[in-house]
Each structure stands twice: as C-alpha cells, then as structure tokens.
Image (tube, grey):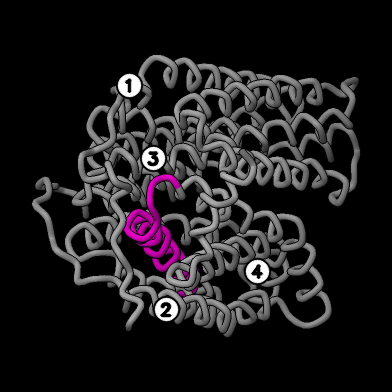
Amino acid sequence: MTVTRERRGSPLWAPDRRAATVGLLLLMTLAAFEAMGVTTAIPTLVHELHGEALYSWPFTMMLATQVVGNVVAGRVSDRRGPGPMLMLGPLLFALGLIVAGTAGTMTQLLVGRALQGFGGGAQIVALYVMIAMVFPERDQPAVFGASAAAWVVPAMIGPTAAGLLTQYLSWRWVFLGLAPLVLLGWVLILIVLRRLPAFEPQPDQPRRGLTVAAVAAAVGLAVLSWAGDHRDLIGLAVGIVGLAALVLAVLVLLPKGTLLSRRGLPSVVLARGLLSGAFLGSEAFLPLVLQQVHGLSPAWAGVPLTGAAVGWWLGSWWQARRPDISRSLMLQWGFLTIVVGLALVTLVAPAWGPAWVAVPAWAISGLGMGLATACTSVLVLRLSPPADRGFNSAALQLSDLFGQSVCIALGGVLVALLGPAGGWSPQNALMVGLGLVGAFLVSRRSATTAEPHPGMQSGGQVQLDTAK
C-alpha cells in the first residue's frame, strides 16, 4: 500500500507539474512568513513611525482588503480563468511588501498592507482554481497537504527570524527580504500559465451585488477588529453593527444555504468557518492566559503554538497518504480531534490548572486542523462545476476569515469583561460547542452522499502543453 500511495503522490513532481508545485508552495510559504513575521515586527515599526494610536490597523487593513481580493479573484477566475489574477495578485503582494518596507509614515505602511491584502487574497483563490485545473482529484489531497507543510517552517521560525531581523538589521527587511522571492514564485507560475490551454468561459450563474457585499464584509471585519481593541460597552455596540454587516454580506458571498448547512457544498463551506473559528478563537488568547495567569515568559507561552503547527502538518501529511478514506469522514475525525484538544486546554484556564497541558492539548487540536482543513479544500473543488470554482474557492477563504474574526472578537469581549482566566473558560466552552456542532453537521449534512459535479468526474484537470 505504501508504494501505491507514493506513486499516486508522485505526479506533484512530474516534469510537467513541477513548476506549478514549486510556484504555489513558494508563494504560500512566503505568505506564511509574512503573516508570522509581521506580528513580531509590528511593535517596533509602529513605534518608529509614531503610529501607536493605529497599532491594530496594519492587521485590519490587510484583512479588509483580503476580503475584496478574494471576491474579485473569484469572479474574474470564473469568467477568464486563473491567469489574470495569478499575474496580478503576486505582483500586488510584492509591491505591497516594497511599499511597506520603505514606509516613512503610517499612511504609507497602511497602503502597503492594503496592497498585500488584496494581492494575497487574489492569489490564493486563483491558486485554488489552478490546482483544480492542473492536478487530478486523486492528487489534490497531496497538494493541500504540501501547502499545509508550507506553513510549518514559517510558524516555527518565522517570528524568531523576524525578531532577529528587526533587532540586528531593521524591521524593513521583514518586508523587503521577501519581495524578490515572491517575484520568483510569480515567474514559476507564469511558466505554468503559458502551458495551460486557452480558457474557455462556461455559462455561469448571474451573481448580483458581489462588489457591494465585499465592501460591506470588509467594513464589517474592520469594525469587528476595532471593537476587539475597545473592549467596553461602546466597543460592544459597534461590534454588533459590524457583525450585522457581516451577516448580510455572507448571504451574498457564500453559497446559498451555507448558514443552514445545506447538504453538499454549503455544509463544507460552513465547516471551514466553524473549524477556523473554534481553533483560532481559542488560540488567539492561549498565550495571554499562559503569561498572565501562569506567569510564563512570551517565549514559553508560544511553545503550544509551535506544537500546533507541527500537529497541523502531521494531520495534513497523513490525510494525503490515505486517499482511500472518505474526505467527509476525515473531516468528521478532524472536528472531533479538535474538540478533544479544546476540552483538554480548558484545564489551563484556572490558576491551579497545569500549564504544561497546553502543549499536548494544542498539538492535538493542530492535528485535527491538519486533517480537516485540507479535506474542506478538496471537497470544495470536488463539488464545484468549472464555472463556479472561483466563486466557491473565494467563499471557502471568506468563511475561514469570517469564522475566526467573529470568534476572536467574541473572545475579546469575554476576556475584557471577565479577565483572562474567567473569560477564557466560557470562550473555550463555546469553541468546544462549535466543534461539536461542526462534527454533527458534517455527519448529517456533509458531502458524504453528494456526488462530484459532472465536470469533476475525471478530476477536472487539463493537459499542460509541455512544448511551450
């Protein structure tokens, strides 16, 4: 069986697909390094640019424009193929890195972050569409498993590397050092695009109001982020307004029936949001609890997050090795594994709780995320007709963003009202509940009984023209 699985995975590195594999993994790895490293550099750069009052806005700006990039790339990819957004997205991301790295004011920094957000949001959706075109369905678990591995090294060394750059050179190199490598990934993707046959537009569903909904979602996420930094009654009221805008946008930006967990594609998209919300809604406050309740140093408080990254990679690697197991069943296993980790880490909240439990508990949750997130990506492509790959891939990313934003904002309110220990216990209980709800919905309403779209029966891939 081992030999068979290795052969099934080998097409990722076949000569005609090698550039696609290296290009997409390089772009994902660099996006991960940027995401992990900027958090470390932000305190220094904000102080140097005299932007303490705007501390959270480099994150907020990128998050808001990422939503718009997701939506635009989804629509363009459905109408014109992944090429235009794969040409534009990495270039804007690299330009954003240069603008941010040379910033002399907070305004310029925020412009750079906006470009990074739009470019990064556009490129991830277009990469999903390219994966559906280049790799047959049997190889897609391995592709998404490899993309998860692309986040492991940045998660483990990204913050430390960014800290060393900031301390001994300049925070600017956290941005500028990545730009040339992004351009290298862009060149590799261009090679793949030249080999793709001409894109043939297919009849698609009329979708009205996407632009307005994308702007509403971006504003809603920005407002929720602001509310998370103003943990009082005013922040709560503003947060409710942001949440309302987000809910209205969701009705347009996600597949019909997502909030009701309709069988098939809608339930998979909802599952992605529940996964992200449950996991990141707890992880965002775990270091805070370990530092303020148990008195750990920032370095030791970050150890469970490293364990989760390793667990995530192991889960992604294992699911890629087992194509014989239903993706829907694997998704259920992922939810239940996350619930076990969340339940265990709740023991850390009280001062009398054992802090060391956070390390194995969060590694278990990371393992569950590795099993589940790759499965949602595979299932979305499996259930998407070619004309809707872009929209549905964008919906998957948006569900991820919405889930984590809402749960982190909720956790911020609870921690502000009840304190780190008192607030994190009910927050974690809610996240455990989300995980159980996700497992139940997947078991009852998932794609287990849904057939692949007819356009995906053979994998939906195209033949690359190696003569180009």
Residue type beneath disc 2: Leu
Residue type beneath disc 3: Gly
SS of the residue at dot 3? helix
- Disc on res. 242: 3
Of the 4 image quadrants, the one containing the C terminus is: bottom left
Residue type beneath disc 4: Val
- Image quarter for residue 56? bottom right
- Disc on res. 449: 1
Residue at (66, 42) in percent of width and height: 312
Of the 4 image quadrants, the one containing the N terminus is: top right
Residue 240 is situated, as x and y percent measured from the top left of the image, at 41, 33
Q: What residue is pinned by disc 2?
A: 91
Q: Nearer the viewer, mark 2 or mark 3?
A: 2
Residue at (77, 43) in percent of width and height: 307
Viewer-proximal residue among 205 and 194:
194
Residue at (66, 59) in percent of width and height: 36
